Image (cartoon, rainbow, N blue to C red):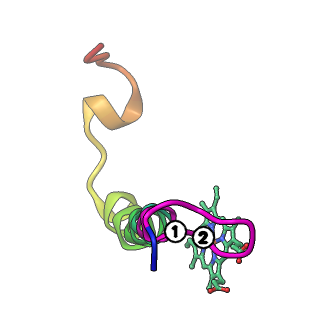
């Protein structure tokens, strides 16, 4: 498999980036459940801005 894309096939670099993106997206699902469970804090309610 070549690194570069060809007319008919994606190269390994594109496939690697695609699956890295997929992993990062899927990691967000449990992170969302975890974040939702956290207790309310001044940061979470928006009364303190960290920016
Ligand atoms: C949870 C995230 C994702 C999953 C589970 C996923 C899964 C898949 C799977 C199973 C395929 C078929 C692979 C194959 O035929 O060999 C595919 C193809 C594709 N994905 Fe994703 N993907 C994800 C995210 C993304 C994102 C974020 C993009 C672009 C912004 C993307 C763009 C594409 C494209 C363009 C194809 C078609 C490739 C081709 O021409 O054969 N995917 N994806």
Ligand 1, image quadrant it occupies: bottom right
Picture layout, residue 42 above or below residue 7: above
Instruction: Return the residue nearer the eye: 31 or 44.
Output: 31
- State the image coordinates of residue 29 (x, y, percent, origin top left): 45, 70
Circle 2 sits in a helix, a strand or a loop, which is it?
Answer: loop
Quarter of the rendering occupied by the N terminus: bottom left
Dot 2 alpha-carbon crowd within 10 angstroms: few under 14, some 14 to 19, many 20 or more:
some
Asked if 26 appears above or below 42 in the picture, the reply is: below
Q: Say whether residue 34 is left or right of residue 25.
A: left
The stretch of residues the image draws in magenta is 3-16
Q: Are marks 2 and 1 in contact (CB under 8 Å)?
A: yes
Q: Position of residue 35 (x, y in %)?
A: 34, 58
**Predominant SS along the magenta part:** loop
* Residue under numbered circle 1: 11
Cα–Cα span, label 2 and label 1: 4 Å
Task: Name the element at disc 1.
Answer: loop
């Amino acid at each position: 498999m070549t690194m570069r894309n060809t007319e008919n096939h994606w190269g390994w670099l594109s496939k690697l980036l695609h699956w890295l993106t997929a992993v990062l997206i899927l990691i967000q699902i449990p992170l969302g459940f975890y974040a939702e469970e956290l207790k309310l804090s001044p940061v979470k309610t928006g009364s303190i801005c960290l920016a």
